[in-house]
Image (cartoon, rainbow, N blue to C red):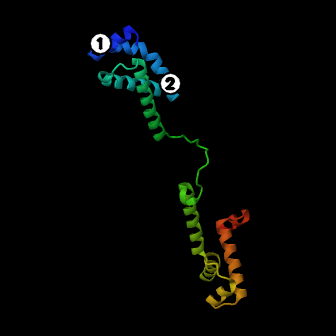
Amino acid sequence: MAPDMAGLVTAAKAGDRQAFEELVRATYTDAYTLAYRLTGNEEDASDVVQEAYLRAFKSLKRFRGDAQFSTWLYRIVANCAATALGKRAKNRHETLDDDAPLADLRPDYDPDARLDASVERERVTEALRELPDGLRQVVVLRDVYDLPHEAIAKELGISEAAAKVRLHRARRRLRERLFPLRGEEAARAV
């Protein structure tokens, strides 16, 4: 250790704050450079150096002088940098662009899609309510419960041909109600 550094360390260990300030001035550039290289960020490097000098000040009385003061200080800087990097990794937040794709586009996990699906479900439910009972029964049994025409006919006590005709009429009315074509909108309004 250089004679003037050794004297500053001895004086700082004895409680001389001015001597510690001189040690800081003598080692700050190298300590900051080390912190910057370890963190890769100016703000983090400043925080690390500040924390390192605070720790060095608090534990200066335990410094034995086996190594140079700067070597001891750089070890503290490295420890502080490792702590800062660990905290940064734990608290890291990535910003998403507004047009970034969503990770999960299933309606169950997308609030907008859930709202849209809810609105569509309400529209379909309302359109089904408007159908006459005979048509509503056939379309629900076929399109919701996936029953074949034969089973629908048997369930409702009608012929299979009648079940097919009712299903065709029910689907046409639902399409006209839910997805009207240009001429159908005007006819519906009258």
Quarter of image, res 113 = bottom right
The answer to whether residue 133 is above or below residue 90 is: below
Quarter of image, res 107 = bottom right
Within-10-Å neighbours for mark 1: few <14, some 14–19, many 20+:
some
Query: Residue 186: image x %, image y %?
Result: 69, 64
Query: Quarter holding the N terminus?
Result: top left
Image point (66%, 77%), residue name: 170
Q: Is residue 48 left or right of residue 127?
A: left
Query: Residue 189: image x %, image y %?
Result: 65, 66
Q: Which mark is residue 36?
A: 2
The answer to whether residue 172 is above or below residue 69 is: below
Residue at which label 1 appears: 11
Q: Amino acid at mark 1?
A: Ala
Instruction: Looking at this view, name the residue that lies furthest to the left.
Output: 14
Instruction: Looking at this view, name the residue that lies furthest to the top.
Output: 4
Task: Indicate which disc, 1 or 2, sits on the residue closer to the N terminus.
Answer: 1
Image point (31%, 25%), residue name: 59
Q: Amino acid at mark 2?
A: Tyr
Q: Which mark is residue 120?
A: none
